[in-house]
Image: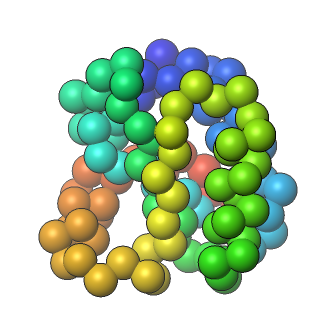
Amino acid sequence: MQYGLTEENIHLLKAIFGKYNAVKEVVLYGSRAKGNYTNRSDIDLVIKDSKTDRHIIANILLDFDDSNLPYLVDLQDLSNIKNIQLIEHISRVGKVLYKRD
């Protein structure tokens, strides 16, 4: 298990992001990226290098809600993050989870 996620979980995440052409790269950050997650940890994700808007993000979150993924997902667009410490954290510990070819 990578990042405390099964291969099935990771495949599901990638399949959902793959449905949206505007999504170019998704980075995992937070406890799962750092390796200090628990069974209850959410999945912190940030979309990078994309042309997403709030409607696309809302649709992606609905896809997660409709899936059998057993974790909460916190999804943000990097271009909307204003917290410098969070941006630095993502840059420092983030792991690319999905990248469109």
Residue 62 horizontal/vertical position (percent)? 72, 53
Residue in view at x 77 percent, y 40 percent: 66
What is the total number of numbered labels drawn onto the structure image?
0
Q: Horizontally, is 38 left or right of 47 in the view?
A: left
Residue in view at x 29 percent, y 28 percent: 37
Q: Horizontally, is 26 left or right of 85 in the view?
A: right
Foreground of the two, 82 or 40: 40
Residue 48 horizontal/vertical position (percent)? 51, 70
What is the quadrant of residue 35 in the picture?
top left
Q: Horizontally, is 79 left or right of 51 in the view?
A: left
Foreground of the two, 81 or 92: 81
The residue sitting at the left extreme is 85
> Which colour style is shown?
rainbow
Residue in view at x 51 percent, y 58 percent: 75
Looking at the image, is 19 positioned above or below residue 82?
Answer: above
Residue in view at x 65 percent, y 67 percent: 57
Looking at the image, is 29 positioned above or below residue 84?
Answer: above
Looking at the image, is 96 positioned above or below residue 7?
Answer: below
In this rendering, does residue 101 appear at all? no
Q: Quadrant of the C terminus?
A: bottom right
Residue 89 horizontal/vertical position (percent)? 22, 60
Residue 45 horizontal/vertical position (percent)? 47, 53
Foreground of the two, 65 or 6: 65
In this rendering, does residue 83 appear at all? yes
